[in-house]
Image (spheres, rainbow, N blue to C red):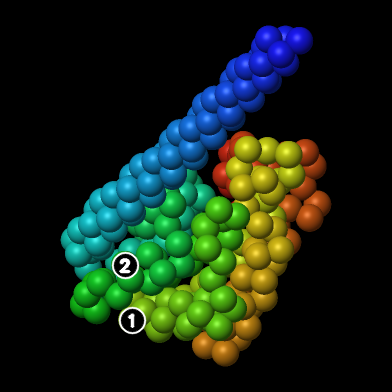
Amino acid sequence: RQHMHIGKILKTAFILTTIIAAGAVMVNGYNDLMDEVVSVRNEVSFFRTQHVELRKRFILDKISQQESDSYGLIVGDSIIEGMNTLELSDIPVINGGIGGARTLDVSQMLASVTVDAKARFLIISVGVNDAVKTSGEIGEEEFEGFVEQLLFNAKRVADRVYISTIFPVEKGKPLGDQYFDQDRIDAINVILKKKSAEHGVSLIESNRAFDDFSGSYTTDGVHPTIEAYDVL
């Protein structure tokens, strides 16, 4: 009986050791997975930063080649970068869209434009990347400061300045409401409207552009279809 008792103890110890080992493997596997997630996020952040800086240089170089009042300029994020600006006006319109750009990125770029190359008009459409769910939320007061600086820099570049609100992201799409925070977008739009009025800047209410649009207006939740670009 004593031998049987010892056998049970050894069997129980073996089972517990196996469970603990399996748990350790699961924990290590989870940690490895989280390390991989962090690594991917860091890589995405690195490539976003690189793209933003390269596009800034390209756009600023393009602007520097223009004569004052001879061109139009539209700046923003990837929604603008993907836009065909060739037929927007009877003068050349420089596409100043920067994929991944946030409000501060566009403001900093405009601050680097030389005043002797002023545009005839400037359209600003930015802000959706400030509403990415995985990014740290910017406080309302801080974001208002970003918009203040953006409009100050914009008026250096052109006398006629327009700023657009952000249209809603679409639900159930990869870059729709699963990726962007619609409540934050709504809050940003309130700030954009408020600041445009305070600074005497014309407002383009893109957030209402698709109220009567039939069918899907984005390819992935945030980037417009060809038909939607026509509406914008």
Question: Cα distance, mark 2 to mark 1?
Answer: 12 Å
Task: Name the one closer to the observer, 115 or 148.
Answer: 148
Task: Name the one closer to the observer, 21 or 76.
Answer: 21
Residue 1 located left or right of residue 197: right
Q: Amino acid at mark 2?
A: Met
Residue drawn at x 31%, y 67% as measured from the top left: 109
Residue drawn at x 66%, y 16% as measured from the top left: 6
Q: Amino acid at mark 1?
A: Arg
Residues packed near mark 1 inside 10 Å, few (<14), some (14 to 19) or many (20 plus) = some
Q: Can you say which quadrant of the picture contains the C terminus? A: bottom right
Q: Are marks 2 and 1 in contact (CB under 8 Å)?
A: no
* Res 213 visible: yes
Q: Can you say which quadrant of the picture contains the N terminus? A: top right
Residue drawn at x 46%, y 49% as measured from the top left: 78
Callout in the foreground (2, 1): 2
Residue drawn at x 62%, y 22% as measured from the top left: 13
Which residue occupies the extreme front position in the image?
Answer: 2
Point out residue 84 in the picture as x, y percentages from the top left corner.
46, 45
Residue 228's place in the image compared with 5, above or below, is below
Label 2, secondary structure: give it.
helix
Residue occupied by mark 2: 109
Residue 214 located left or right of residue 195: right
Residue occupied by mark 1: 156
- The tag earlier along the polypeptide, 2 or 1, is 2
Residue 103's place in the image compared with 52, above or below, is below
